[in-house]
Each structure stands twice: as C-alpha cells, then as structure tokens.
Image (cartoon, helix red, strand yellow):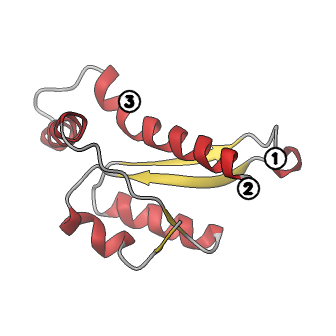
Amino acid sequence: MRKGKMCAQAAHASLGAVLPYLTEISDPYDQIRRDHERKIEEWLAGPFKKICVRADSEEKLLAIHQAAKDAGLIEFLVTDSGLTEFNGVPTITCCAIGPDTDEALDPITGELMLL
C-alpha cells in the first residue's frame, strides 16, 4: 500500500472502532458496552494515544483481530473496497484495537513491530 492509503485505512479503523460507541444508544444494563464507552471517553479527553504496528501477513492480522475480539476489547477490522489499489479486489488492510490499557493490549500487540 502507498503511505497515504495506509494512513486512510488506519483512520477508517480508528473511527470504525469508536464511532458505534458514540453514536448508538446504549443499553444501560450492558456493562461491557458501558465500560467500552467509558474507555473511549477517557481516551478522547486524555492524551489520545495511538500506536501503529504491523502484521507481516493477512493471516497474522486476522489472528490479532480475533485475539482482540476474544479478549473482549474494542476492535474494528477494515476491508478496503479495492477501488484505488488491490486491482479491484476487496482486501483486508488493517484493524484498530482499543483504546484500552497497556496491560490489556500488550498480550495481543506487544510483539508487533512499529510501522
């Protein structure tokens, strides 16, 4: 991917991860959702930290995404439509995980190389 495309895909992922918690009405009895909403609100009000890392294959990216889902973390997987790159083929490009604590994220992303 070109660098600009990478940036756009990362932006899609981060927005896809947080917007549902900011725009949809939450169930007051859904404690997991309320915890996610609280983490997002704290993140938006705080240092707004983002770290970009890379996976060396689509299989690795999917495994990382699944591990985040299994851990109950906020996550979002991006599949690009393929209109500007990838020869018209829809392609999984990236995922967002979090916001969350370092302790929650490190077991899933800690071994990945910075982008």
Secondary structure of the residue carrying numbered label 1:
loop
Q: Which residue is mark 2?
A: 1
> Which mark sits nearer the N-terminus, 3 or 2?
2
Amino acid carrying mark 2 in the image: Met
Quarter of the rendering occupied by the N terminus: bottom right
- Report how far apart the C-alphas of labels 3 and 1 lie in the structure: 26 Å
Q: Which one is nearer the viewer's eye here, 60 or 55?
A: 55
> Which residue occupies 30% across, 50% down?
49
Measured as percent of width and height from the top left, residue 43 is found at 22, 41
Residue 38 sits above or below residue 85 on the image: above
Figure quadrant of residue 9: top right
> Which mark sits nearer the N-terminus, 2 or 1?
2
Q: Residue furthest bottom?
A: 111
Amino acid carrying mark 1 in the image: Glu
Q: Are marks 2 and 1 in contact (CB under 8 Å)?
A: yes
- Report how far apart the C-alphas of labels 3 and 2 lie in the structure: 25 Å
> Which residue occupies 35% across, 36% down?
18
Q: Are marks 3 and 2 in contact (CB under 8 Å)?
A: no
Measured as percent of width and height from the top left, residue 22 is found at 30, 25
Query: Which label sits on residue 85?
Result: 1
> Which mark sits nearer the N-terminus, 3 or 1?
3
Secondary structure of the residue carrying numbered label 3:
helix
Q: Which one is nearer the viewer's eye here, 93 or 30?
A: 93
Measured as percent of width and height from the top left, residue 81 is found at 74, 40
Q: Which residue is mark 3?
A: 19
Query: Which label sits on residue 15?
Result: none
In the displayed structure, does residue 53 sit left or right of residue 37? right
Q: Which one is nearer the viewer's eye here, 3 or 40?
A: 3
In the displayed structure, does residue 5 sit left or right of residue 96? right
Residue 99 sits above or below residue 64 on the image: above
In the displayed structure, does residue 40 sit left or right of residue 78? left
Secondary structure of the residue carrying numbered label 2:
loop
